[in-house]
Amino acid sequence: MSAESWCCMSGEATHDQVVVVTGASGGVGRAVAEAFGARHARVALLARGHRGLATAADRVRVQGGTALPIAVDVADSAAIDAAADRVEAELGPIDIWVNGAFSSVFAPLQDITPAEFRRVTEVCYLGFVHGTMAALRRMKPRDRGTVVQIGSALAYRGIPLQSAYCGAKHAIQGFHESLRCELRHERSGVHVTMVQLPAVNTPQFSWVLSRLPRHPQPVPPIYQPEVAARAVLHAADHPNRREYWVGASTVGTLLANAIAPGLLDVYLARTGFESQQTDQPGSPRRPANLWAPADDVTDFGAHGEFDDRAAGTAPQLWASQHHGMLAAIAGGLLAGGWALWRWAR
């Protein structure tokens, strides 16, 4: 389903909305920016890579939206605040801010330098903090607006070879929960919500710094970035939920970790290394976007190299978005069953 057709089904009118998406030059951020473009929103695209940004902005315009590409590093709080000023000056008051920028290192902890670990934390965690702060400075005086944090099942469950990324996602989860409590205490009209994603077919597996002997891959099952984008748009439209889980694998992982985290430790210790690598040897010439953007001269787009293995739909996503309806149906079935049992007796 295209972003435009999904938009029409959602019934949301977003022609006048101003949306900021960080990490918008590639991957999930790119898919989110294009989906908002299909809803004819005014989209500010924040990322470092000039070529990726330019092409993403063109795609937003083709979809029918207004695009404002801004080259910025989310680790620089002053630069992010200045970017927010520019967005409001050129597009208008920010309605939705989506935090999605990230970088990482695929390696065992002993093979990651302190500087690399710090950089991942600055981008993946503090980048979300900087974006949220910039958004709230403008939204809270108006008492309206929504911040969407793009999270991961790894915000709850750490896996081997991704300690820096998992640590950052856990930090975002705690930050998100704390902020929600503060906004509720203030009875603020500003909303924050979080979308926990499964493995997604994005270019990160081609450009994240890797010290693995073989080419990295997402842990199956794999979903297309448009699945994630639909979830992010739904969360932006319905931000009263504290978080959304996307994909049956996310649900299964989070439930297993809540029930038997020790057993999951054992399972991931046995399978986590092999499942995150293909059969192809790693290339010493692969790009790495930790310190500099990989898409500065080459546009990687939203999709990675696993299209043949990635699902374009996630039935569980519908269930996550309609849990109230499902609970009512389940309650009705239980009540009906109880009444039938009473009648039979």
Image (spheres, rainbow, N blue to C red):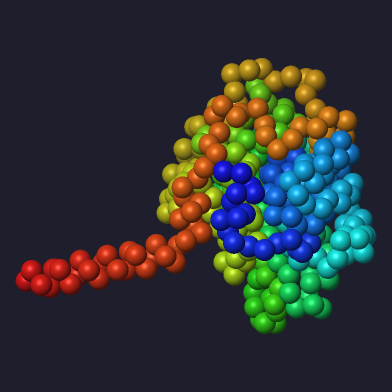
Q: Which residue lies furthest to the left in this view?
A: 345
- Name which residue lies at 67% across and 70% down: 191
Where residue 272 appears, as percent x and y from the top left, is: 54, 34
Residue 12 position (above or below residue 252): below
Relative to 5, does residue 90 appear above or below in the rendering? below
Q: Is residue 112 left or right of residue 271?
A: right
Q: Can residue 26 be seen in this view?
A: yes
Answer left or right for 224 relative to 55.
left
From this viewpoint, is residue 109 visible?
Answer: no
In percent of the image, x 86 and y 36: which residue is there?
51
Nearest the viewer among 97 and 212 is 97
Q: Residue at x 86, y 51 (%)?
A: 68
157 or 198: nearer the viewer: 198
Q: Which quadrant of the figure contains the C terminus?
A: bottom left
Residue 284 lies, in percent from the top left, at: 78, 20
What residue do we see at 79% from left, 72% from top? 139
Q: In which quarter of the image is the N terminus?
A: top right
Q: Is residue 91 left or right of residue 269?
A: right
Give how far across and how far down residue 247 sits, in percent: 51, 47
Disc tally is 0
Horizontal side of residue 16 vs 193, given as left or right: right
Q: Quadrant of residue 204?
A: top right
Picture quadrant of residue 112: top right
- Across and down, in percent, residue 228 comes to 61, 47
